[in-house]
Amino acid sequence: MNTVILIECMVSGRESCASVAGMRPHVLAMVLAGGEGKRLFPLTRDRAKPAVPFGGTYRLIDFALSNLVNAGFRRIVVLTQYKSHSLDRHLAQTWRLSPLLGNYVAAVPAQMRRGPHWFAGSADAVYQNLNLIEDERPEHVIVFGADHIYRMDPRQMLDQHLETGAGVTIAGIPVPIEEASAFGVIDADETGRIRSFLEKPADPPPMPGDPDRAFASMGNYIFRTDALLDALAIDAADEASKHDIGGNIIPLLTERGESYVYDFAINVVPGQTERERGYWRDVGTLDAYYDASMDLVAVHPVFDLYNRRWPILTWDMPRPPAKFVHDTGERRGEAVNSLVANGAIVSGGKVRQSILFPQVRVNSYARVEESVLFEGVTVGRGAVVRRAIVDKNVTIPDGFQLGVDLVRDAERFTVSAEGIVVIGKADKLA
């Protein structure tokens, strides 16, 4: 097939493109980004969970999208719903792919095509957007979550999916069996065929050949399109269903013997260290978000943002470099074991093991320790911020102490189970 025909084939999205030597079958990626994220409140008070800032520069959704785009899956729809303005704006400003070969990342708000109601569950979100599948006519549909921190090459998962002929392949991550009851657990045989899918079981079944670990579902799926459409139609007709992919669609396909697990631990990403391999964090709670943030500021971070061969992609407006000023006595601007974004100014304060987003200012004699400060936060002179997450555009007054007296903080602010103090966007402190 010559180059002209090849380009025409790719632009049109015809299923016959799969027959071109070296090409993969036609795939559509759907990223589920409509969740409320109640357990991340107040960070989700004014934004959708996938739009929550992370790592000094990124949004949570950037990780899933980067994995797809780096792997060459560049026809992507993002299904949004709750408080989606900042997410929609981020997608429009950041994820603009070249349309020359039919590439796109498209935000799709809830359209109520199946009736006047919001998404009833993850399966219903896909069902209400079947027109996207009908228009694209893919052979396989990737369905990924939008709010996990990880690197993954989904091409390898697709290869296994094609080899087994599965109706659905579920990404599973090995976890210690004593922790598995917190997840959806996959019970698979030695071939990878799934025998059952159990939601937070009290007695989780172990992985084949490994009694100490169990397969936890990562919420990432690859469906054969015909299997997905058939399962969605059956689920939509079931009034007793919760219309959830993990709780309803997967059990249906499992009963038919069409479900397989993909072991995330065998996924190899270019440029990834052996230490990072298998890293995956569900940042669905404030403590999980905080712990994943602290993973980034270690001297040898288990998750490396600096991998140029598999970058986490995003965009930020042009800003001046970070600035550190004053070097007299105790009035010294410094940051140690920290991530400091462009536009931040450390003016005579001390920052340790923290993440500063753009346009953060830490004033003289202030101390910021083991904290995450979102864009536009100002820390006043002599203030102390310890083990805290502070959302955008908050001013911490001169001499104010945050995270020092947790009993007092809990009377005024959100304090997590592990003692992390969280301040909402633009909240007033006094």
Image: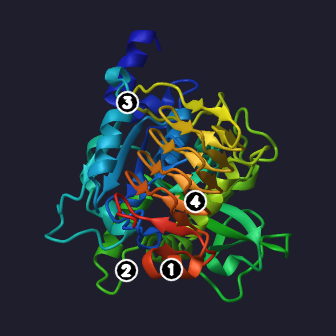
Give the mark nearer the N terminus: 3 vs 4.
3
Query: What percent of the width, then of the height, locates residue 306?
Result: 66, 33
Image quarter of residue 207: bottom right
Numbered disc 2: secondary structure: loop
Report if the CB atoms under discs 2 and 4 are less than 8 Å apart: no
Q: Label 4, on which residue? A: 385
Instruction: Find numbered disc 1 in the image and state the secondary structure of the residue it sits on.
Output: helix
Mark 1 vs 3: CB contact within 8 A: no
Horizontal placement of 135 versus 1: left or right?
left
Q: Position of residue 21 (x, y in %)?
A: 56, 24
Q: CA distance from mark 2 to mark 4?
A: 43 Å
Q: Is residue 54 above or below residue 201?
A: above
| Residue at (33, 87) in percent of width and height | 240
Distance in Å between CA atoms under marks 2 and 1: 36 Å
Mark 4 lies on a secondary structure that is strand
Q: Which residue is mark 1?
A: 410
Is 198 in front, or is 321? 321
C-alpha separation, residue under disc 1 versus residue under disc 3: 48 Å
